[in-house]
Amino acid sequence: MEPYYYREDIRKSLKDDSAEIAAGFREIIKGGLRVQLKLVNYFKGLPISYPATPVDFTGTVLELDVHPQQAVALEQTGCTFVKCSYFDRPMLADVKDADVRRMMASLANFRFVEILAEQRVSLRLKLEPPCDAQIIGDAEPIDGKVLDISLGGVSIRASRPSYLREGKGALLKVMVPNLLQSGETQLELRSKVVAVAREEQGEVCRFSIESDPHVEGVISRFIFQRQVDLIRELKEQS
């Protein structure tokens, strides 16, 4: 799970919080407590959330009955957010196993978190494959690839160090897929730098973008069709 989806919310220490979570799930299972439990995955940016049923807790591993589409998302993302009415805050857990056919999953390595993705105003979806982009600031333009986009922002992997600073303005030239016509639409976006992260594959620059009716129309059409395609993909694999 990309770090911008969540923030650690440690209550005491990771060890103590882990012990508290384990004790809670043991009480739920042994006591047969009725709890509301939902899993939340961001499948290529699309939130997938279905109720799940705790079945067993052995050692540090929670076994669950899950929805088949959730099982697909668990298998592909490798981790999940857990929202359970027994606990006063959500958790992040690693996926130990996910079986689409049997509609079961095993989770481990629980820790309390704050889900930052739920605070977003608009849906941010990944582009596959990434599209061409150019960042135009004070220095020479920088080529890059659009990784994800929403009505309020865009993430671009730069081809070289950008030396951009948070809050700095930049003009972005990005290509956005037109999924209905199997083409691309070029947009010019006025933006501000939100964050710059150095990753193994290169620098990722995240921008907030100014509102513009034409831009919003193009991005809205992409996001709608991309959601349709992702839901179809999940159904086909489940």
Image (cartoon, rainbow, N blue to C red):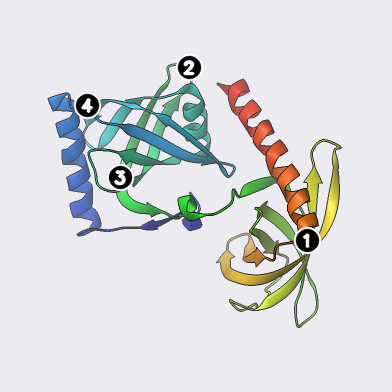
Q: Above or below — where is 32 with respect to 203?
A: above
Q: Which mark identifies residue 110?
A: 3
Residue type (three-letter) at the residue carrying disc 3? Phe
Q: Which mark identifies residue 206?
A: none
Crowding near the residue tagged with mark 4, few <14, some 14–19, many ≥20 C-alpha atoms within 10 Å: few
Residue at (61, 79) in percent of width and height: 165
Front: mark 1 or 4:
4
Q: Which mark identifies residue 133?
A: 1
Query: Left or right: where does residue 113 sit relative to residue 124?
Result: left
Indicate which disc, 1 or 2, sits on the residue closer to the N terminus.
Answer: 2
Residue 112 at x, y percent in the picture = 30, 51
Q: What is the distance, in whole Å, between disc 1 and disc 4 at their CAs? A: 50 Å
Front: mark 2 or 4:
4
Residue 99 at x, y percent in the picture = 45, 23
Q: Which residue is mark 2?
A: 101
Residue type (three-letter) at the residue carrying disc 4? Arg
Residue at (44, 39) in percent of width and height: 40
Q: What is the distance, in whole Å, between disc 4 and disc 3 at their CAs? A: 20 Å
Residue 233 vs residue 63, the one in the foreground: 233
Residue type (three-letter) at the residue carrying disc 2? Arg
The image quadrant that residue 160 belongs to is: bottom right
Residue type (three-letter) at the residue carrying disc 1? Ala
Indicate which disc, 1 or 4, sits on the residue closer to the N terminus.
Answer: 4
Q: Which residue is mark 4?
A: 34
Q: What is the distance, in whole Å, between disc 2 and disc 3 at their CAs? A: 25 Å
